[in-house]
């Protein structure tokens, strides 16, 4: 069910020989992430459960289950910015109904993140996924 952008990440991870190279790739993805305006970094967009500062600002186009989802995201930690970019590749451009059907942790497991992130980073990643899933589940 993964999108082409996410599949590109999976292929890149398969090509890279070791986790250190994959880690650098995630950081590079974070560096390439468009900056999130400070005005959007509010308590309402802050993701609880992350060791670092993380914000996700949803952007919906349309209404109901057919609304297309996108988001701006940012963090004060470069690896977390990279994880936000990975989630963007997984979720952006999908409908809310499609997002609800994604098993994000299974998709992310394909990258080996579950084996190579610290427990704090893993908890933070789950918190970001949870925030996106909650947005997709919200009525109307």
Image (cartoon, helix red, strand yellow):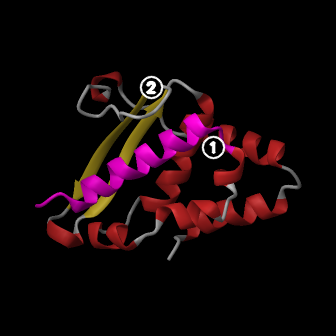
Nearer the observer, 59 or 22: 22
Residue 5: tell me if it is visible.
no
Percent coordinates x, y for residue 9 in the rendering = 66, 59
Q: Is residue 87 above or below residue 65?
A: above
Image quarter of residue 17:
bottom right
* Quadrant of image for the C terminus: bottom left
Image quarter of residue 7:
bottom right
* Residue labelled with disc 2: 53
Image quarter of residue 43:
top left
Residues in magenta? Answer: 117-140
The secondary structure that dominates the magenta segment is helix
* Residue labelled with disc 1: 29
Nearer the observer, 115 or 6: 115
CB under 8 Å between callouts 1 and 2? no
Percent coordinates x, y for residue 73 in the rendering = 42, 39
Instruction: Determine the secondary structure under disc 2.
Output: loop
Q: Is residue 102 left or right of residue 122?
A: left
**At x 36% / y 33%, what residue is drawn?**
48
Q: Residue furthest left?
A: 140
Q: Residues within 10 Å of mark 2 (few under 14, many from 20)?
A: some
Percent coordinates x, y for residue 35 in the rendering = 46, 31
Percent coordinates x, y for residue 61 in the rendering = 23, 59
First of labels 1, 2 by sequence position: 1
**At x 50% / y 26%, what residue is drawn?**
52
**At x 49% / y 37%, what residue is drawn?**
34
Number of marks in picture = 2
Q: Is residue 73 magenta?
A: no
């Amino acid at each position: 069910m993964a999108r082409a952008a996410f599949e590109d990440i999976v292929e890149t991870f398969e090509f890279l020989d070791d986790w250190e190279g994959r880690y650098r790739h995630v950081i590079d993805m974070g560096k390439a992430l468009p900056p999130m305006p400070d005005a959007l970094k509010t308590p309402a967009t802050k993701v609880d459960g992350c060791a670092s500062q993380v914000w996700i600002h949803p952007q919906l186009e349309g209404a109901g289950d057919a609304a297309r989802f996108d988001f701006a995201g940012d963090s004060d930690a470069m690896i977390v910015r990279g994880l936000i970019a990975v989630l963007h590749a997984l979720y952006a451009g999908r409908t809310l109904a499609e997002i609800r059907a994604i098993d994000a942790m299974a998709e992310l497991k394909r990258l080996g993140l579950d084996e190579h992130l610290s427990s704090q980073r893993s908890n933070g990643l789950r918190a970001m996924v949870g925030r996106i899933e909650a947005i997709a589940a919200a009525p109307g």
